[in-house]
Image (spheres, rainbow, N blue to C red):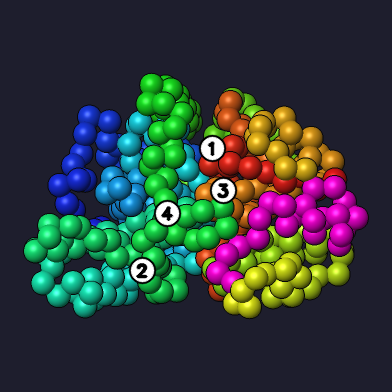
Amino acid sequence: MQKSLDFGTKSSAQKEDNYSVTAEKAFEHANAQMISFIAADAPGFENWTEASIDPKPIELYDINGQKLFYQFSVYKEKKLIGTIDIYANKTLGNSFNDIAFDPIPYKASEAMKKSKEIAKKNYPTGEIKSTNLVVYSYPSIGAMTVIKDKTTGVEHRIFVDAYTLEEVEDKPETETELGVWSMHEMKLENGVEENLKEWKKSDQLTKFIEQAAVDKGVDVNTAVTEEDIKKISGDMEVMASTSKKLGVPLRGQQNEYWCGPACIQMISLYYGYPTPTQKSIYYNFPWKDPEPESGLSSADIVKWAKNKWGKTGTIDNSMTNSEIVTEIDKRRPFFSMLTNPNHFRVCNGYLIQNGYFYIYINDPMPEGSNGTPKIELGSSKEKKRIYVR
């Protein structure tokens, strides 16, 4: 099981500010989200009654040193059934990042240890300033050790992936090449003022759900029982939701570059098309290097849709929720992408509840797994979509 410990050693760059969210407040938000989804019988939460959240989260940092998420583990009968990521700062907008269903625990301690070992080996006279678990390229999680060269005063960062335990090069990512990027900075692109408004709205929703539960005699700090759900379900404001979820098979990517081939497999299986191996999909495209170190591009997906499926792939940057409803209602899953780089996922459903629009994602990460099903706020992290019609 994934232990609920603070693995980090903090540096001066990680000081709390007036907009910081405490772990206790984050727990309230995580619990309210869970109660609301269970009460509404949202897809994916059918078996979450009797589940409880460990109130001691794992703290995940950004590569810029700022605390990014509190990751809460959800257990049922002592089995890890989900994780809930809540943003650790009000300036990052709505508090809710995502819920992952049946997640694969990462090797936190091993990654932290290895990043320190590499730092000491590469810079034997350096001084380690901090080591933390970080989101180095969402959704990738790893350990980051910051070590300062005592001679030059230059600080170096050592990244180790928390699943593969492989070192990750500290370089900016491109559209097709892996590296590291700051999710914290990406979230600030909406503007701090707008993000603070969104956080306030999410806090108001949390208080509303908590009060609705308390009014029904439900203790929000304990595991939600089936009897509790029946009580809360009588509140139509909490219950009201609209959803549709397609049965897209989940597939995990077999190496760090094959998220695109994994998503092609998912959609091929959904439509009943012949489904090649990820390797054969990847090498279907011309590569200058016999052992390329890059992923597929958006144009590659469009070509595959035309040549292999006889369909039109349409690249879209507008990211409206109405388009999601149209595609899913017409039973057409699509590619939902994070950039940079192009990390491909498959969107296979939506949920409209409590004034928010959520999307269901089949994420092929982590590498070497069977993939991870998630629910997240619509267009909160997406940078591009490819519709297949």
Of badges 1 and 2, the one in the foreground is: 2
Distance CA(mark 1)–CA(mark 2)? 26 Å
Of badges 4 and 2, the one in the foreground is: 4
State which tag comes first along the sequence, 1 or 2: 2
Percent of width and height locating residue 85? 43, 48
In the image, what residue occupies the spot 14% across and 75% down?
124
Q: Is residue 54 magenta?
A: no
Give, as a three-letter code, the residue at label 4.
Pro
Q: Is residue 281 visible?
A: no
State which tag comes first along the sequence, 4 or 2: 2
Residue that mark 4 sits on: 172
Q: Answer with the quarter of the image where residue 258 lies.
A: bottom right
Residue that mark 3 sits on: 338
Give the farthest residue toward the front. 288
Of badges 1 and 3, the one in the foreground is: 3
- Magenta segment boundaries in residue numbering: 292-313
Give, as a three-letter code, the residue at label 1.
Ser
Residue that mark 2 sits on: 160
In the image, what residue occupies the spot 27% across and 61% down?
157
Q: Which of 260 and 324 lies nearest the eye of the viewer? A: 260
Quadrant location, the C terminus: top right
Q: 15 left or right of 248?
A: left
Q: Callout 1 environment at 10 Å: few (<14), some (14 to 19), or many (20+)? A: some
Q: Which of 172 and 247 lies nearest the eye of the viewer? A: 172
